[in-house]
Image: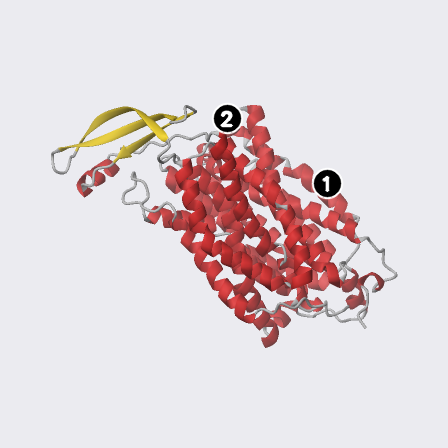
Amino acid sequence: MAQNVRDVAPAEEVTSTRRVIAASSVGTLIEWYDFYIFGSLAKIISEQFFPKDNPTAALLATLATFAAGFVIRPFGALFFGRLGDLIGRKYTFLVTLVIMGGSTFAIGLVPGYKTIGFFAPAIVFILRLLQGLALGGEYGGAATYVAEHSPAGKRGFWTSFIQTTATFGLFLSLGVILIVRQTLGVETFSDWGWRIPFILSAFLVAVSVFIRMRMSESPLFVKMKKEGKTSANPLAESFKEKDNLKMVLIALLGATAGQGVVWYTGQFYALSFLQNACNIEFVQSNLIISIALLIGTPFFIVFGSLSDKIGRKYIMMAGMLIAVIAYRPIYTVMYNEANLKNKVEVVEKKVVTVKNTVKGADSLITTVTTKAFTDGTSFKETVKAKFPVDPALKAALSKDKLKPETKKEVTLPQNLYYKMIGLVLIQVIFVTMVYGPIAAFLVEIFPTRIRYTSMSLPYHIGNGVFGGLVPLISTRLVEATRPAPNLPPADPLAGLWYPILIAGVSFVIGSLYISNKTNNLDTE
């Protein structure tokens, strides 16, 4: 007969499930906050830590540094997962919390490129790697710890609270950034105020360490340790045994890879798209994401709880399939609405003569300045250009570093602002479908003795590598469609092909090989 998790360690302090959830979630939320303020401030960081003569290259370098923190996460999963299976869940994710908080605090103190040159991005890169290593050990510990305190029939429900911490961490990072920016002003914030969200991490981490120190160890781990059943070599047992390795690969390719790209497309790529492709003003773009996250976050718990009743597989696969089908239509509407197509009144035209230095002939570029919507509401001035098709002229423009395309930030009117929130919210719902049940799914398919190690690796490869590379790869795909450096991309939606492809592959593999059963933990 299954043994109730609350009876497995009577000599230990028994902590209520609610308290376990609260204590685990606070620490995990803070780690996500630390991890995501870097991405939320990518544009400013690119200006602070990289040369300013090529903004596109600086942004790509910043996104690459951001992605490095994701790519390193599987190594953190292996290292800290092994520790968690050897010495326990509690102390392992205490260590990860301190490393994460220290690295984040240090990023806020690093001098900029103007002061120490290329040492600035090099130091930030190293600190970003430390963040990734720490996060690689955090999630598996928190999810395992909560699952091992939860009753079998409600494991999807209780672990879904851990799933909300990633989104709330992003929400908290955006909120802190907006408050500091509005308090200090745009110029001061861009100059040095951006450091405050990083420095605040020291206080948040201190609070979280205090909370976690008061937590008891997982009762299932305590029972297993007393019985001498812990694994002597969690890494070898996780990846050398054929059956367990098979489950690791199925979990990665059939679930976490697709879940990862849907997660980062619906939140980080959406923010990058609003700011860089749609040119929506900084505060308004962040508010759009923040409000959508706030409204959508409860659905993590809805779908987590629903997975206890109908199974994890059906919900996750449905989320991936709908995302694959809907991404391009959603982003097409976002792009068209934000760029004010067919909604503006042209009030001024002027012709600019550009010398074609290659052929010796003059070419004309028509610059259109739009001033207002046809309904009379105003927005910030946007300048567009009708570009000549002469390849030689394009090369001359690029060589002379002329920029016929000048885009200024746009402030959306109220009706489009609400519509944009709705479009992002739809993507957040996709995120909650694939992410809400995933912790319970991963915990249940691996045995307790190697659970921390086994579940951490596919989770962090799926999210850290496949998901974390979404902003970089997607931005690079869009840049590849740009006919010349100073011309607009031919397909501003090209970046969506990467998440569509990965989510589609995961849907097929997951549909074929993942079971929809909700299993009990092996030591219950």
Q: Position of residue 287 (x, y in %)?
A: 54, 35
The residue beneath circle 2 is: 186
* Element assignment for label 1: helix
User: Of 434 and 7, which appears nearest the observer?
Assistant: 434
Q: Position of residue 280 (x, y in %)?
A: 45, 34
* Mark 2 or mark 1, whichever is nearer to me: 2
Residue 360 visible from this viewpoint: yes
Residue shown at 68%/42% (left/top)? 205
The residue beneath circle 1 is: 207
> Of callouts 2 and 1, which one flags the residue occurring earlier in the amino acid sequence?
2
Q: State which quadrant residue 2 falls in.
A: bottom right
Going by the numbered disc 2, the residue's amino acid type is Val
Count of marks overlaid on the render: 2
Q: Position of residue 258 (x, y in %)?
A: 52, 59
Q: Quadrant of the C terminus?
A: bottom right
Going by the numbered disc 1, the residue's amino acid type is Val
Q: Quadrant of the N terminus?
A: bottom right
Kindly check if marks 2 and 1 are in contact, taking CB atoms under 8 A apart as contact. no
